[in-house]
Amino acid sequence: MPSKQATSFLAAEAEALCRELEAAILRLLERADETMNDRAKLLLAAVNALFVARQIAKTLKGA
């Protein structure tokens, strides 16, 4: 079991990852020249990654 300090650090890192993913999603959508179907797939994959990162951050905060 990680120490409380290590868990806090990991939670902060997960939150930083969420912010980076959000920014990357916006950049990808702004620059995407693909068809709407490709953009939809890209957005779905990015949002799924963001959801996973948020769940990790939430879990670590509660630990």
Image (spheres, grey):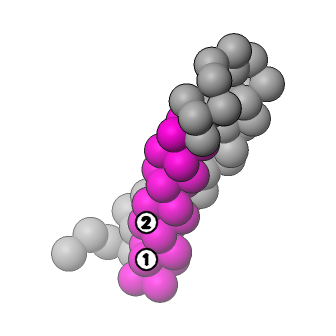
4 displayed left or right of 46: left
Q: Position of residue 62 (x, y in %)?
A: 47, 84
Residue extending furthest bottom?
Answer: 62
In the rendered image, the vertical position of residue 47 relative to residue 24, given as above or below: below
**Label 1 Cα crowd, 10 Å radius (few <14 / some 14-19 / many 20+):** few
The structure residue drawn at horizontal position 43% and vertical position 66%, both measured from the top left corner, is 56
The structure residue drawn at horizontal position 26% and vertical position 69%, both measured from the top left corner, is 2
**Label 2 Cα crowd, 10 Å radius (few <14 / some 14-19 / many 20+):** some
In the rendered image, the vertical position of residue 18 relative to residue 1, given as above or below: above
Whether residue 60 can be seen here: yes
Q: Are marks 1 and 2 in contact (CB under 8 Å)?
A: yes
Q: Secondary structure at mark 1?
A: helix
| In-front residue for pair 35/27 | 35
Q: Secondary structure at mark 2?
A: helix
Q: Is residue 59 magenta?
A: yes
Residue extending furthest right?
Answer: 30
1 displayed left or right of 50: left
Pointer 1: what residue? 59
In the rendered image, the vertical position of residue 4 relative to residue 28, given as above or below: below
Q: Position of residue 18 (x, y in %)?
A: 60, 51
Residue type at tag 1: Thr
| In-front residue for pair 42/55 | 42
Pointer 2: what residue? 56
Q: Main secondary structure of the magenta part?
A: helix
Residue numbers of the magenta segment: 41-63
Q: Is residue 54 magenta?
A: yes
Q: Position of residue 53 (x, y in %)?
A: 48, 57
Quadrant occupied by the C terminus: bottom left
Where on the picture, by quarter, is residue 40? top right
Q: CA distance from mark 1 to mark 2?
A: 5 Å
1 displayed left or right of 8: left
In the rendered image, the vertical position of residue 10 relative to residue 4, given as above or below: above
